Amino acid sequence: MASDAVNCGGRAMVDSPARPRILLGLADAHAEPLVAGSWIGSFVSLGSLLRRYLAKLDERQLVVAISVPRRDYVGALIGSGWMLSSPVAGLDKPLAVFEASDRSTWLRAVTDKLIVTGRFTNLEAHSSGPRVRTGGKYLPVDRYRAVSVLDEECESVVGQVPAGGYLADLTGASASWLERLAAPPMDLALVGTSKWIREDLEAVIGDGTAEGALGTRLGTYVLPFEPRAATWSTSIVSASRLGEGELLSESCLMAILDRYGAIKYLNDVTVPIVVCIVDRSVADESAAETLIEARHSHSQPISVVDELHWQPPTAVEVMAFTVAI
């Protein structure tokens, strides 16, 4: 929203005489009413704008430092915009994937209602059409809408397809929703206090202008890795694990460092885009000092408004620069 617009995947939704004002709302749980705020869509928009900026980095790292009154939800919102603006994976037709699979193949197969993840077993001819046994489920092939091959072994899990909700409709991601669930990008990491990050992802987002509107979990868009998940995408990394030398995945393109506990490891993070969330509700200048030091180390300043095309919300301060990786 940079003010009251949401820009994801190249689509901008703005106020106009022909379109009612778009304002997103948040709530901590489904049972609670959504509370609207223009800052909500602004952070979603930033996630999509950062993905768009990837192509301009030319082997440099972009660091965006965001100082906010409170850290709550900010990383989850930016991550949602990043994920919803990701390109859709080009998947072969389900039957072709099943025909090319054997017992050493692990798949994620999505129907209109189910996400079936696990080892492929076999494909069988049937009078009503071919049937497949994969992930412990035996179903007609024509039930499946999107299938992807997984790089690693996993246990068999069957989950429900979550509704994309208002934000997926708003950003255009609903048109490819099942493909996104089958093959989400593995290119985001949220680093900080795991408990707080997961609590943020339980919050729900939706239409802030419609009375009684239902929200969708932010985790539905970010798809955090967790036990017994049928589909996953984003790593939730405890800051202490970075301190112990753990490296982020090679596929990671953006890391969000939440508060100083994560920001202090900025120099150890080599992914193309790093977002640092500075929480001003904590009386500690350490995060700001770390970022100022990084900015002074052979960096090139970036204009948030003119180059990232993002207008920070009220009471939010931003600094952006690039450094050599």
Image (tube, rainbow, N blue to C red):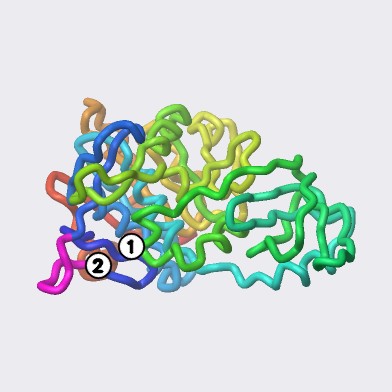
| Residue 49 appears in the rendering | no
Instruction: Give left or right: position of 309 versus 106.
Output: left
Residue 4 higher or lower than 227, as above or below: below
Residue at the far left: name it: 17
Q: Any magenta on residue 300?
A: no
Residue 122 place in picture, x, y as percent: 88, 57
Q: Nearer the viewer, residue 255 or 43?
A: 43
Q: Any magenta on residue 20?
A: yes
The residue under label 1 is 170
Residue located at (27% from left, 69% from top): 12
| Label number found at residue 13 | 2
Q: Nearer the viewer, residue 285 or 222?
A: 222
Q: Main secondary structure of the magenta part?
A: loop
Residue 227 higher or lower than 20, as above or below: above
Q: Earlier in the sequence, mark 1 or mark 2?
A: 2
Residue 85 higher or lower than 252, as above or below: below
Q: Nearer the viewer, residue 117 or 48?
A: 117
- Bin the neighbour count of mark 1 within 10 Å (Cα to Cα): few under 14, some 14-19, many 20 and up: some
Q: Which residues are magenta?
A: 14-21
Residue located at (27% from left, 46% from top): 213
Q: Quadrant of the N terminus?
A: bottom left
Instruction: Give left or right: position of 192 versus 124.
Output: left
Q: Are marks 1 and 2 in contact (CB under 8 Å)?
A: yes
Q: Secondary structure at mark 2?
A: strand
What type is the residue that disc 2 sits on?
Answer: Met
Q: Nearer the viewer, residue 116 or 296?
A: 116
Residue 69 place in picture, x, y as percent: 19, 36
Residue 9 place in picture, x, y as percent: 39, 68
The quadrant where residue 284 appears: top left
Q: Secondary structure at mark 1?
A: helix
- Bin the neighbour count of mark 2 within 10 Å (Cα to Cα): few under 14, some 14-19, many 20 and up: some
